Structures are given as C-alpha cells and as structure tokens.
C-alpha cells in the first residue's frame, strides 16, 4: 500500500518551476561544494587519482539519482526521500530517513557556509585588508570568536527564501551560470600550466586511498536531490523531476572531473596538503596569472557559488520539514505557509537561524563526514524503496522507470553501503549519537503527534485498506 503523503487540509505551495528551474535547483545545491571546500582535503588522501574518487562518488550518486527519478515520478510531492520512504516503507523508516535528511541539509549548509570565510578573505586581500581572526572563524581556532562570513551568508539566504521561491529561484539560476563560468575559467587558466607528469604515480596511496577519498568527496554531491524537494512547486512534477535530477547529475559530475584534472595538472598533488592551501583554486589562479583582478573575480564568484549552494540546500531543508510537519513528525509551525509569499515563512526563519548559529560558532570537522554518512543512508533507503515497490506494486504507473530491471537500485544501495563503510570510526560514532537523539525525539514527540499515532485503531485499519 502507498500511504497518502498529502494532507488535504494543508496550505499548498505555488507551482512555478519547470524542468529548467528544477535542474538549476539541483545544480545550485550541488555544484561548488566539493571543488571549493573539499578538494584540498581529498587530494592528500587520493593523490593525483582524486578525479577517479569524484567519478566513483558521482556514479554512486547517479545510481541513487535514477532511483530518485523513479520515485519522484510516482510520489511527486515535497519532502524528497522522506516522502518516498513514508509512502512505501512506513512512518518509522520515514522518520529515520527524514532525520538523516536533517543531518544532510542543515549540517551541510553550515559546512559550506563555513568554507565561505577563506574565499571572503581572499577577496578582501586584493584591497589590502582581511577579517580579523576573531571574526574569521569560530572559537575552535586560536583567537576565533565567530565566523562572521558564514553567519552573513546564511542570514542573506534565509531572507531571500522568505521573500518567495520564485524570487530565490531567479537569483539561484543567475548564480549557477556564474559558477559554471568561473569553474570553466579556472580550468582554462590551470590548463595553461598543465603538466602530465603531475599524474605520476596516479595512485600513490593505492586503491584504498581513492575509495577513502570517494567517501569524503561524496559530500560534493549532497544536494542533487534538492529538486525532489520541490515536487509541490513543480508545474509538471511527474515529467520534469526525473529529467531535472538526472540532467543535474551529468552537469555536476562533468564539472567536478574537469576541475579536479586541471587542478592536479597545474600543481603537484603534495602541494594540496600544505597548511597554506586553504582556498587552493584561488591560489592556483593567483600563482599562474599573477593578476589581482583575476583573483578578485574568481574569489568573489566563489563566494557567490557558495551562496547559491546555501540558498538551494536551505530551501530543501525547509520543504522537508514542511512535509514532516504535515505528518505530525515535527512541530506544526514548520508547515505554516504564508499566504503572501507562498513559502513556509516561520519554518524557513527557524531553520535559517539555527543553521546560521551553527555555522558561526561550531567547528564542523567530522560533522561534514557525518553529513555524508547520513546522506548515504537516506539514499540507500530510496533504492530499497524502489526495489520494494517493484516487488509489491508492479502495476503502479511510473512516469520514469530505472532501466535494466533491478540492477540500478541494487547497485545504488550496495554502492552507498560501500562508501559508508569507508568512513572513519569517529564518523560512525557521531552518526550513532545523531540517530540515538533522533529515536528519543521520535518516541518522545513524533510518534504521539503523527497522523498514524493519533488515529484510532479502527481509523488506522481503514487507512490501510484504502
């Protein structure tokens, strides 16, 4: 049985997005985070073969993206994989998935926003100034008090999202083209200093190094499912969501591999492990061009790229919480839609405020990896949901169906599990604590306030028969 994933009494969001806008949401939520924030951490682990790590992570994400596309065509509502698992595997599994999505979206937004500080400083240095240490990082760094750049980036994104989805969508689309342009610009600049010898040896850390790096750079693909959170705001979700999800994955993976290859070609892989390479792409542009204008252009555009990711991922988080609130899994105010803006105003404000505080004050470190493990687990559940529906409901109408029978969802689930196993013990410990807190919330609040939990036994049996 597929449970009803809509609340007939809920206020509806406005349908304004076509396939182009949906693709831009996914690309905007994804493109930039791995290259701008994670690349410098992944190269010392994988060596020159880091581009292979991006391909492995991309294949894993693409397999899940195809499963997402099939589910999005059958369950075209806001809520992403939470809605898919609720509709197929039930409330308890859906809560686990939704709690993982909170980890995926909220913590990843904070992680990306924290990465903005280095690029803001690189931009300011062109003018001979930079943020003082007290405002450049949180209290985890010597002299640090608050990461002002991260706070401002999240605050501006929250204000824009509160104005309306259409307005924020236009801004996001413009910024997506800007960041594609700057990444192409970087690749052209880096190619002028390209040395094939930088790729020898290709795998100095062996295959284990590449797979470990793939688990880390999977963070780069977090957000590709953002289009699936816009199901209720899509004009033709059954047709457009599958197209947007798959197209965005092709665009993002191609750009990641291009930039990774040209970056390694321009600089030896050992260079990326130096403490001075906090914003490696900006430094490569500066060393090659010796042009302050080129550095300013790239650094400023990188801040815009990060801002685009923050907008779209924060957008996805607010829509997931909206859907969960309709099911009674989180407080009802997350589901209140403003008649004037057509957006979940209070939920967006609360989410943005919490993320801004987290980004400004808390060192993320292993939490970034915990974001990856939570995302991989949620993606694994979507692949399982596709298999489950293929077995139990083969007659259901599917506007898109993953090819090759069960091959893609099975491989997608196995690939997610494989990357999860390659993450470190501390990451698993953080994930375990996060899930423990989630179970406390579920049994302490969500189970008693959910639609299923508040049904009488007779009504629940009647819903199952419907």
Image (cartoon, helix red, strand yellow):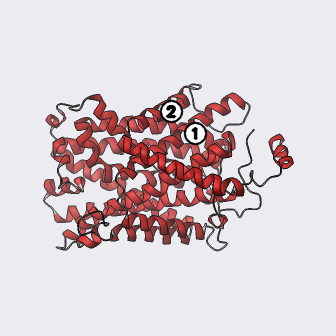
- Residue 427 appears in the picture as rendered: yes
Residues tagged 2 and 1 counted as in contact (Cβ below 8 A)? yes
- On screen, residue 244 versus residue 365, left or right, reads right
Q: Residue at x 35, y 61 (%)?
A: 114
Q: CA distance from mark 2 to mark 1?
A: 9 Å
**Disc 2 target residue:** 412
Q: Which residue is mark 1?
A: 382
Whether 238 is drawn above or below 235: the answer is: above
Percent position of residue 71, x then y: 62, 41
Helix, strand or loop at label 1? It is: helix
Q: Could you tell which of marks 2 and 1 lies nearer the N-terminus? A: 1
Identify the residue at horizontal 57%, vertical 39% (top origin): 381
Image spot of residue 53 (x, y percent):
33, 37
Of the pair 29 and 9, the residue shown nearer to us = 9
Residue 78 seen anywhere in this rendered image of the structure: no
Percent position of residue 350, x then y: 54, 68
Within 10 Å of disc 2 (Cα), the crowding (few <14, some 14-19, many 20+) is: many
């Amino acid at each position: 049985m597929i449970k009803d994933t809509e609340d007939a009494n809920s206020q509806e969001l406005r349908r304004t997005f076509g396939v182009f806008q949906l693709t831009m949401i996914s690309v905007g939520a994804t493109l930039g985070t791995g290259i701008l924030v994670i690349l410098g951490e992944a190269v010392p682990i994988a060596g020159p073969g880091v581009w292979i790590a991006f391909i492995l992570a991309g294949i894993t994400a693409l397999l899940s993206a195809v499963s997402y596309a099939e589910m999005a065509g059958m369950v075209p509502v806001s809520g992403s994989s939470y809605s898919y698992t609720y509709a197929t595997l039930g409330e308890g599994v859906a809560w686990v998935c939704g709690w993982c999505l909170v980890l995926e979206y909220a913590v990843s937004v904070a992680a990306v926003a924290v990465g903005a500080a280095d690029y803001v400083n690189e931009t300011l240095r062109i003018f001979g100034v930079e943020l003082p240490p007290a405002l450049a990082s949180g209290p985890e760094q010597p002299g640090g008090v608050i990461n002002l750049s991260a706070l401002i980036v999240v605050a501006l994104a929250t204000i824009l999202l509160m104005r309306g989805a259409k307005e924020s969508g236009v801004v996001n689309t413009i910024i997506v083209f800007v960041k594609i342009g700057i990444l192409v610009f970087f690749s052209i600049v880096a190619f002028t200093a390209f040395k094939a010898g930088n790729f020898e040896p290709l795998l100095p850390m062996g295959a284990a190094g590449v797979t470990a790096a793939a688990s880390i750079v999977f963070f780069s693909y977090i957000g590709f499912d953002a289009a699936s959170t816009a199901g209720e705001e899509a004009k033709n979700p059954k047709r457009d969501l599958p197209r947007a999800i798959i197209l965005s994955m092709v665009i993002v993976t191609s750009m990641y591999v291009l930039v990774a290859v040209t970056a390694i070609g321009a600089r030896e892989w050992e260079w990326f492990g130096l403490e001075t390479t906090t914003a490696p792409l900006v430094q490569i542009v500066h060393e090659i061009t010796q042009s302050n204008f080129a550095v300013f252009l790239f650094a400023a555009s990188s801040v815009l790229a990060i801002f685009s990711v923050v907008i779209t991922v924060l957008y996805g988080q607010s829509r997931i919480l909206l859907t969960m609130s309709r099911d009674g899994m989180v407080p009802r105010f997350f589901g209140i839609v403003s008649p004037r803006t057509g957006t979940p105003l209070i939920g967006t404000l609360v989410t943005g405020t919490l993320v801004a505080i987290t980004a400004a004050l808390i060192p993320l470190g292993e939490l970034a990896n915990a974001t990856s493990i939570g995302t991989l687990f949620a993606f694994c559940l979507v692949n399982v949901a596709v298999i489950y529906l293929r077995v139990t409901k083969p007659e259901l109408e599917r506007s898109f169906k993953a090819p090759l029978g069960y091959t893609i969802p099975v491989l997608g689930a196995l690939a997610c599990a494989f990357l999860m196993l390659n993450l470190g013990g501390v990451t698993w410990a953080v994930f375990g604590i996060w899930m423990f807190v989630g179970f406390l919330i579920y049994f302490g609040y969500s189970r008693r306030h959910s639609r299923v939990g508040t049904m009488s036994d007779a009504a629940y049996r009647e819903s199952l028969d419907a």
